[in-house]
Image (cartoon, grey):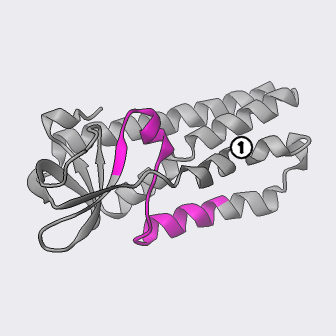
Amino acid sequence: MLSKLAKLMLTGTSLAPVALVYAWVVYTDGKSLVALALVALAIVLIVIMVSLLRYCRKHLERSKFKVTSIEAADREYITFILLYLSPLFTAQFGDLNWHILIPTMIIFILVISTGYGYHFNPLLGLLGWHFYKVNTDEGVAYVLITKMELRSARQCLTVGQLTEYIVIDLSDNGRSA
């Protein structure tokens, strides 16, 4: 189990598209060096996410996971879309209130990564992953991250445990990275 590190990485890498939106805003303001730095940051975040997926595939302990109920859990994208698009609503990059924006993003990452809150990562969605809220025979609810489209409850998967309540599909059907 990766626990806090995995939560921090899942949350942090979900901000890669935000960096790309800010890069566009900065570029249109004529600050191409800052835009290039933001694009580089987005690429680094994407590489971190892909590396995390590959690490999980190779190193996480595999265990059988029997699902008794399934619910799609990647409906929380609207919040992220608003976060991603918010820079486009300012007149210029210089008009952004950095004294509020930066601490807000840091608090967002810390709150999500240290609690049991839900961790939807649109970057994983772009890479073809799906999120499901699943229950087990023991009555425990987890967030399952998989490349498969689950249509039936009563499935047995091979998973690795990322955090206490987040598991990732490691079966050959749910090809990772």
Residue beneath label 1, please? Answer: 85
User: Vertical placement of 151 versus 128: above or below?
Assistant: below
Q: Is residue 48 left or right of residue 19?
A: left
Seen from the viewer's position, the closer of residues 41 and 84 is 84
| Bounds of the magenta segment | 105-131
Seen from the viewer's position, the closer of residues 2 and 11 is 11
Percent across and percent down for residue 1 are 22, 59
Q: Quadrant of residue 58?
A: top left
Whether residue 108 is in magenta: the answer is: yes
Whether residue 37 is in magenta: the answer is: no
User: Vertical placement of 89 versus 63: above or below?
Assistant: above
| Residue drawn where x is 28% and y is 63% of the image | 142
| Residue drawn where x is 72% and y is 33% of the image | 23
Percent across and percent down for residue 42 are 57, 35
| Residue drawn where x is 27% and y is 68% of the image | 141
Q: Is residue 19 left or right of residue 74?
A: right
Say few, some or many: other residues with alpha carbon within 10 Å of mark 1 (under 14 / 14 to 19 / 20 or more).
few
Q: Tell me, yes or no, if residue 1 can be seen here.
A: no
Q: Quadrant of residue 165?
A: bottom left
Secondary structure at numbered mark 1: helix
Q: Tell me, yes or no, if residue 126 can be seen here.
A: yes
Q: Report the residue that reaches farthest toward the front.
A: 152
Percent across and percent down for residue 125 are 44, 39
Looking at the rendered structure, the kind of residue marked 1 is Leu
Q: Is residue 81 left or right of residue 168?
A: right
Quarter of the picture holding the C terminus: top left
User: Vertical placement of 75 versus 149: above or below?
Assistant: below
| Residue drawn where x is 54% and y is 61% of the image | 109
